[in-house]
Amino acid sequence: MRPPPLDIATMQTSKDVKSIVVDYPKRTANLLLKDGSAVRVINMGCQHSGSIAQSWVMNPPPISDGAAWIKRAEQLAGIAFTPGESKLFDAWASHGQLQKQGEDRLERDGTGYGDLMYSIAVEPIGLGEGAWLTISYSYP
């Protein structure tokens, strides 16, 4: 399978993005957001085709606030995924809750429209340095 193309135009026009560096051959992009957060987007393709976006969130909401993290995940999808994929991700994310995994991690995995696989994971970085928010979609 071929990885989906990076939607650089969407990333560049996002009001939240301050700067972007793209590695076209590797289908990756690194973004600096205006709030100081950083995002890495990796589009992949082999057994599964899809995208992973990981954000270092500065001044994160409490780990226990699942609704705030779902909202952040939807915002990240709007920056990192194509508008069509972002819309499907948002529809999936809004119909569920993040589950606590261990003492300080939230997760949710599942299928959505067309049996696409989606995931959200939140994990604090420690020493008060923010948190990692990772979202993904992949075609089966």
Image (cartoon, rainbow, N blue to C red):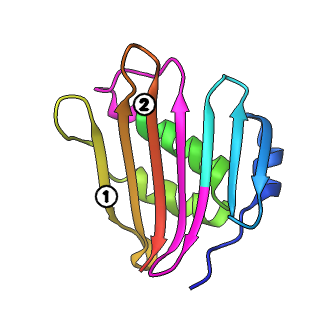
Answer above or below: position of 65 versus 30: above
Looking at the image, residue 49 sits to the left or right of residue 115; the answer is right
* 90 or 45, nearer to the observer: 45
Amino acid marked by disc 2: Ala
Q: Is residue 98 visible?
A: no
Amino acid marked by disc 1: Asp
Q: Are marks 2 and 1 in contact (CB under 8 Å)?
A: no
Q: Residues within 10 Å of mark 1 (few under 14, many from 20)?
A: some
Answer above or below: position of 117 versus 34: below
Q: Residues within 10 Å of mark 2 (few under 14, many from 20)?
A: some
Looking at the image, residue 7 sits to the left or right of residue 72; the answer is right
Q: Earlier in the sequence, mark 2 or mark 1?
A: 2
Q: Residue at x 69, y 64 (%)?
A: 27
Q: Is residue 69 visible?
A: yes
Magenta span contains residue 54: yes
Q: Position of residue 48 (x, y in %)?
A: 46, 77
Q: Which residue is mark 1?
A: 109
| Magenta segment boundaries in residue numbering | 42-67
> Total number of numbered labels?
2
* 116 or 18, nearer to the observer: 18
Q: Residue at x 47, y 70 (%)?
A: 138
Label 1's element?
strand
Q: Which residue is mark 2?
A: 68
Q: Residue at x 58, y 44 (%)?
A: 76
Which quarter of the rendering shows the C terminus?
Answer: bottom left
Check the image and name the residue furthest to the left. Answer: 102
Check the image and name the residue furthest to the bottom. Answer: 1
Q: Residue at x 42, y 22 (%)?
A: 61
Looking at the image, residue 102 sits to the left or right of residue 66; the answer is left
